[in-house]
């Protein structure tokens, strides 16, 4: 069976999704279609991002999102593109998005899935030609089909994800996703308009030598985090911090390392959002053999209470995350 799952580098994303579906004899193809919808929206957003330096669409839009942060125009565009693709696809009843306060009902009440998405993360990097990303999680709805999705459908624990992924708009554009059977990465070839399998079966190193954290806030870190950061320096680890979660995560996933967004004075619960930032990457990192923690417990076991709730994040190579947890635990 594992032979059947191994597809060669260069397989297109569409073919890959189709072949994976054949491994689940009762699959109806809806999840596959949903993944293709996301990939299509990603291509469109990729095009908008690539053009943003040329035409005057980047820059502050004069509007703020629900967290009170400045919203860049490309965030708005990405949000529209992804929501539209999910609505048109028909597999999704309800979406939650970083850009919108309330649940978004697609009107497709037959849809079996709910999606949590950060359409364009790393907004402070948009205007300066630095990598940005899209992050998404897919859950099966719990409520009966034929009606709108509910708050309970949207607030499931990360362990219930059926798929999760991200798109990194970087020196090349990549889509990385999991359906709970390993992690695969696809690189976009713009002239052909296709994603090709470039990183089959990604596994993350058990340990690493990169730590990623915004040390500008270190005065307000808790004692355990301060000590762990000092430990990283004592070990001569390299500090790498782009300030774009997807890009920092992706680098550490491939090379081995730890990304941290701990509680700070400004963000007592950390800055990142549980439902469409932490859980998605947690599912991917675990599927790749790594770990994701709040510092105290497994991210995917956090019981969500609010659509936009925040949560501290320590994610990456297992040994590094466990070491961070150790420092946090012993200074509690
Ligand atoms: P955003 O959703 O407003 O873009 O914020 C999330 C981003 C992450 O991509 C990144 O890791 C983090 O914010 C950086 O925050 P900081 O500038 O506080 O270090
Ligand atoms: Mg974000």
Image (cartoon, grey):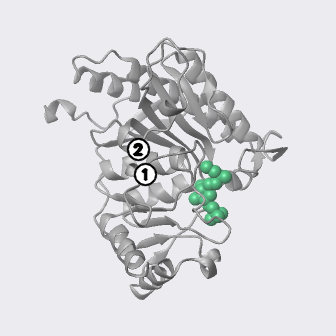
Mark nearest the camera among 2 and 1 is 1
Asked which quadrant contains residue 20, the reply is: top left
Quadrant including the C terminus? bottom left
- Write the residue at 48% across / 17% down: 111
The answer to whether mark 2 is within 8 Å of ligand 2 is no
**Residue 235: x %, y % from top left:** 38, 85
Task: Label 1, secondary structure: give it.
Answer: loop
Q: Residues within 10 Å of mark 1 (few under 14, many from 20)?
A: some
The answer to whether mark 1 is within 8 Å of ligand 2 is no
- The residue pinned by badge 1 equals 302
- Does residue 238 appear to the left or right of 269 in the view shown? left
- Residue 293 drawn above or below residue 86: below
Q: Is residue 172 visible?
A: no
- Residue 211 drawn above or below residue 38: below
Task: Label 2, secondary structure: give it.
Answer: helix
In this rendered view, identify the residue nearer to me: 314 or 159.
159
Q: Does label 2 or label 1 sit earlier along the sequence?
A: 2
Circle count? 2
Residue furthest to the right: 62
Discs 2, 1 touching: Cβ within 8 Å = yes
Q: Residues within 10 Å of mark 2 (few under 14, many from 20)?
A: many
- Does residue 77 appear to the left or right of 165 in the view shown? right
- Residue 117 drawn above or below residue 40: below
**Residue 264: x %, y % from top left:** 61, 70
Quadrant including the N terminus? top left
Q: Can residue 295 be seen in this view?
A: yes
- Write the residue at 33% across / 69% down: 322
Image quadrant of ligand 1? bottom right
- The residue pinned by badge 2 equals 158
In this rendered view, identify the residue nearer to me: 32 or 217.
217
């Amino acid at each position: 069976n594992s032979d059947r799952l191994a597809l060669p580098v260069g397989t297109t994303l569409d073919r890959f999704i189709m072949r994976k579906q054949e491994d689940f004899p009762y699959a109806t193809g809806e999840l596959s279609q949903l993944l293709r919808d996301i990939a299509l929206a990603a291509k469109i957003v990729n095009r908008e991002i690539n053009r943003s330096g040329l035409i005057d669409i980047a820059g502050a839009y004069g509007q703020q999102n629900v967290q009170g942060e400045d919203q860049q125009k490309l965030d708005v565009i990405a949000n529209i593109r992804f929501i539209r693709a999910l609505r048109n696809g028909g597999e999704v009843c309800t979406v939650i998005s970083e850009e919108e306060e309330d649940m978004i009902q697609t009107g497709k009440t037959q849809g079996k899935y709910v999606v949590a998405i950060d359409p364009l993360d790393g907004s402070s990097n948009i205007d300066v030609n630095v990598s940005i990303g899209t992050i998404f999680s897919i859950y099966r709805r719990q409520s009966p089909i034929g009606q709108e999705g509910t708050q309970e459908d949207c607030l499931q624990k990360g362990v219930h994800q059926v798929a999760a992924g991200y798109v990194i708009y970087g020196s090349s554009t990549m889509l990385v996703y999991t359906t709970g059977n390993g992690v695969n990465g696809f690189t976009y070839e713009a002239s052909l308009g296709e994603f090709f399998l470039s990183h089959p079966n990604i596994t993350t190193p058990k340990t690493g030598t990169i730590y990623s954290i915004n040390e500008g806030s270190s005065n307000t870190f808790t004692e355990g985090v301060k000590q762990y950061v000092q430990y990283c320096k004592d070990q001569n680890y390299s500090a790498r911090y782009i300030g774009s979660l997807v890009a920092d995560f992706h680098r550490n996933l491939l090379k081995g390392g730890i990304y941290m967004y701990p509680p700070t004075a400004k963000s007592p619960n950390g800055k990142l959002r549980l439902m469409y930032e932490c859980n998605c990457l947690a599912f991917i990192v675990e599927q790749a053999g790594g770990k994701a923690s709040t510092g105290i417990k497994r991210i995917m076991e956090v019981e969500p209470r609010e659509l936009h709730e925040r949560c501290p994040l320590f994610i990456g190579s297992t040994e590094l995350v466990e070491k961070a947890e150790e420092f946090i635990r012993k200074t509690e």
